[in-house]
Structures are given as structure tokens and as C-alpha cells.
Image (cartoon, helix red, strand yellow):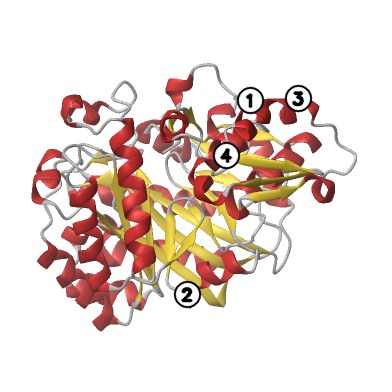
Amino acid sequence: MTEVAARHYASLAVPRYTSYPTAADFTAAVGREQYEAWLRRLRQGEAVSLYLHVPYCRDLCYYCGCHAKIARRDTVIEDYADTLIREIRQAGQYLTERPQAVHLHWGGGTPSILGGEGLARVTQVLREYFDFSDNMEHAIELDPRKVDKKLARDLARIGVNRASLGVQDFNPAVQAAIGRIQPVEQVEATVNALWQAGITSLNFDLIYGLPLQTAESLRETCERVGMFRPSRIACYGYAHLPARRANQKLIDPATLPDADARFEQAHSVGEAFLAMGYEPVGIDHYALPQDTLAVAARNGRLRRNFQGYTDDDCPTLLGFGASSISQFREGYTQNIADIRQYGAHVAEGHAPVMRGYAFNDSDRLRARIIEKLMCDFSVDLNEFAPAAQFSDELALLRPLTADGIVTVQDGVIAMVPQHKTLVRLVAAVFDEFRRETAHSFSMAI
């Protein structure tokens, strides 16, 4: 395949496939009734993952695509913590037995905005309904600008053992263009505070495709990241969707790299971290060889859920907080995204579920195929679906096969190694809900 063709494919818009069906395909046909019924089916000791979404930040970065909102007053934060606790207790009423939490993840927004006391209160309520596994991974997303030694100690006290730091980029000009000034020294102080508190498993989150970024400036950022030696690094492509995220209108589109530049940036990031001894995990993650994520990738046990790549193999993920998504064996549910409406439903004693999706057999099969492609870059249809007919899908793969992106032989679909980053295009072939409105999704690279 020519480089021109590769760059063309990289510019196509496809889902990220952190789920199948994607959240864009959820409907109001699945709601509170199904959520409560699915909770009742959880059994004693059944392994589950927990996710808590805190949608507030003190300042909103220009690039942010999350369900987040600025909170100026502490009372707003306190009220949200109270609402989160009420939601957990309401869900707990439908648990007939005590599942075992093996993963707990705080996301946002800036979840540490709850403060040490607020985080501890919510964690204690979770313990009322779930048994925490002795080796539970307890992770939190942090803004390096908002972490001090006291917060680090508070996090360790409630059992946090992994922290993800939103670094994004170290270049001062890029930081100014995205409204997030955080010098290297500030990140270093946060890392030291976490290490001193005993939280040594660190993830760094980066973004390429930001305004004023170049492949060279990103390489410099990667070199500085390497000095901290985080156990995991995620580097996502920025999705500029100002029609859906008003804060992104603050970014001058003329300063954004074009498809060719994004292509170069993604490759330069990969080359930089591989040279530092990191192993590639999926399409946008890197991990040190001894990290559990790298081990899972090597052993074919890598999974993918709403947090991205993970070694978490729980079939059930319970999400709490505005906009959070829960995954059950039977399907998905999603909470109301609007914070006020979310709070009003919880105050009335109702599960704040607004939509979801109930799986059928075809969905389960396609979800397994898509996850296998996204994690292992290959799938044997004879193993997953020996009796299934995928003639339409195989026909759609022919152009990708002709261009040398993927191979298809005796039912085995495999990405050509140098084009693994285009795997989302191959996964989309098995997506029965593909949208004609490509602008709803981000670029493949």
C-alpha cells in the first residue's frame, strides 16, 4: 500500500470500539427496569468492576471531550458526593447478594475534586454492598496541577494503588493553545508526592493531534515522559468536535495538524516509546514489559472496555455518577448525562438510567470478534463462529486486503503488522450499526 493510501485510510472516521454496540447505538428502549433486573441477578462473590464518574473540574481545558463541567463552589462538589452516595445505596437495594469488587476506577472530570474526605465517604459506602478483593486494583485519574502531598496520602489511605496523570503535552506553546499550563516541574512534584505516599503504579495520558503540535515536539514530550518511567502510557488522537463540545470552539482550527501530520505524530510516538523499552499494547497504549497490561497482551488475555485497554476480564462493570455506563452480561445501561437531571432522579429515589442496549446472540458474537481484533489484531472466524456466514463482511474487506492492510485466509483475519493502527477500520466491517454520518466519530488515526 502506498503512503498516500495509508494516510487516506487514517483520516476516515470510525468508532473507537471500547464497546459493541457503541454508546451511539443505545436507545431509550432499555432503561431503569432492565438495570434493576440485571442488578438482581448478580451473585455472592461474583467478580465485578466499579466505575465512579465525577464530572466536575475547577477549570475546563479547551480540548476536553468528556462529560465535564466547571465547579466554582465547594457546596456543588459536596452535593454531588451526596448524590453519588445515594445512587450507590439505591442500586444496593437491588443486590440480593454481595459481589466482589476486583477493580475500582475513578474518572472524570477531576475525581480528586471530591477531596480526601469525599473520596473516603464514597469508598466506605461501596464497602457496604461489595466485598473488596485483597488484590483489587484501585485507580484514579488525576490532574497533576491539583495534587499535593496531603491528597496523595489521602488517596493511599483509601486504597488507591494506581494513578493516571493527564499530561497531554509538555510543550509550552501547545499547553497555552489548549488552556492547560502545567510545567514539567509540576508533574515531577506530583509524581514524587504519589511515590512518597506509596502509589508507584503510574499511567501517563498523552494526546496527539493537538493545536501547534508537530512530530518533533511530540518526540520531545515523549523523551520527558520517559524520564519518569511510568508503567503505562496512553496516547490518544484528539477528536475535534466543536459542534458537540462548546469548549472546543476555543481552539483555532487553523492550528490543528492535518491528517498527514496526525499520521506522522502517531508513528513518532510509537517509535519513541518502543525505543525506550516499552511494549505496544493495542493501538494507543504502551507498557513496561513487567506491567500486567503488557503481560496480558503477550498472553492473549488483553481486554477492552469503556476505560480502554485493560487486563480486567469481569463481565460486569457497574458505573455510578452522571453519564456513567454499566455493562452486564445482558447488555448496557447509561446514566443521564445532564448533572441536574441526574441529581433530580436520584433525589426522587429512581435509578438515573436514561438509555441502554440489550444484547442478542449476534451482538455477543460480533462483540467478541471486534474485541479480538482490537486487542490481538487477528481473529479466527472458524474458532469464534464456525457456522456463521460473513460473506458481506468478507466482501467489504476486499479493498483493505487489496491495499495490503489486512490478510484473509481460511477464515483467519489478520492485520498486516505495519498497519495495525488501522484496525478500527477492519473492526467496523463487523459493526451492524455503522453510521453514514461519519462525522459522529473520530479519525482512525
Q: Name the residue under label 2.
A: 289
Work out whether residue 129 can be spotted. yes
Relative to residue 147, is residue 411 depicted above or below?
above
Question: What is the C-alpha distance between the residues marked 2 and 4?
Answer: 27 Å
Question: At label 2, which amino acid type do we have?
Answer: Pro
Q: Mark 4 points at which residue?
A: 405
Q: Mark 3 points at which residue?
A: 392
Q: Mark 1 points at which residue?
A: 433
Question: What is the C-alpha distance between the residues marked 3 and 1?
Answer: 14 Å
The residue at the point 27 percent across, 69 percent down is: 226
> Quarter of the image holding residue 351?
top right
The outermost residue toward the top is 436
**Of circles 2 and 4, which is in front?**
4
Q: Specify which label sits upstream in the sequence, 3 or 4.
A: 3
Label 1–label 2 contact, CB within 8 A = no
Label 3–label 4 contact, CB within 8 A = no
**Of circles 1 and 2, which is in front?**
2
**Of circles 1 and 4, which is in front?**
4
Residue 325: horizontal and vertical position, in percent?
Answer: 52, 43
Residue 399: horizontal and vertical position, in percent?
Answer: 62, 27
Residue 301: horizontal and vertical position, in percent?
Answer: 64, 64
Label 1–label 4 contact, CB within 8 A = no
- Secondary structure of residue under mark 4: loop
Q: How many labels does the image show?
A: 4
> Quarter of the image holding residue 133?
bottom right
- Secondary structure of residue under mark 2: loop
Relative to residue 298, is residue 344 depicted above or below?
above
Q: Specify which label sits upstream in the sequence, 1 or 2.
A: 2
**Of circles 3 and 4, which is in front?**
4
The residue at the point 64 percent across, 61 percent down is: 313
Quadrant in which the C terminus appears: top left
